[in-house]
């Protein structure tokens, strides 16, 4: 009985959610992809520098 009440309350809350539009979703997706690429480049450079440094010390 509590499970049914829970799902009813979840449904009621989901009706009150303000969902973003298509334009906002595309903007947010582009931002996430762009920042992910920048982080990937950053970590690749850091990895290369560390590898070079370790080879230099060995």
Image (tube, rainbow, N blue to C red):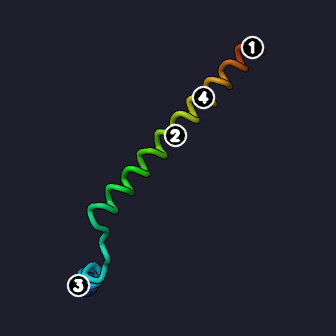
Q: Secondary structure at mark 2?
A: helix
The residues bearing labels 4 and 3 have C-alpha atoms spaced at a distance of: 51 Å
Q: Position of residue 8 (x, y in %)?
A: 23, 84
Reading the image, the residue beneath label 3 is 8
Residue 46 - label: none
Residue 49 sits in which quadrant? top right
Helix or strand or loop: what does disc 3 sit on? helix
- Callout 1 touching callout 4 (CB < 8 Å): no
Q: Nearer the viewer, residue 10 or 30?
A: 30
* Position of residue 53 measured from the top left corner of the image (x, y, whole percent): 72, 20
Q: Earlier in the sequence, mark 2 or mark 3?
A: 3
List x then y, in percent, for residue 13: 30, 83
**Distance in Å between CA atoms under marks 1 and 4:** 16 Å
**Residue topped by disc 1:** 56
Give coordinates of residue 32: x percent, y percent. 43, 50
Camera-side residue of 29 and 2? 29
Asked if residue 3 can be seen in this view, the reply is no
Q: Earlier in the sequence, mark 4 or mark 3?
A: 3
Mark 2 vs mark 1: in front: 2
On screen, residue 33 versus residue 44, left or right, reads left
- Name the mark on residue 38: 2
Q: Earlier in the sequence, mark 4 or mark 2?
A: 2
How far apart are labels 4 and 2 at the CA level?
Answer: 11 Å
Label 4 vs label 3, nearer the camera: 4
> What's the residue at 62%, 23% (across, down)?
48
Hey, which quadrant is residue 27 in on the image? bottom left
Q: Give the quadrant of residue 17.
A: bottom left
Position of 11 relative to 58 (above/below): below
Name the residue carrying label 4: 45
Residue 51 visible in the picture: yes
């Amino acid at each position: 009985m509590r499970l049914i009440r829970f799902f009813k309350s979840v449904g009621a809350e989901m009706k009150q959610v303000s969902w973003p539009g298509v334009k906002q979703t595309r903007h947010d997706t582009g931002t996430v992809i762009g920042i992910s690429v920048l982080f990937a480049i950053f970590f690749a450079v850091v990895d290369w520098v560390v590898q070079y440094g370790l080879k230099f010390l060995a």
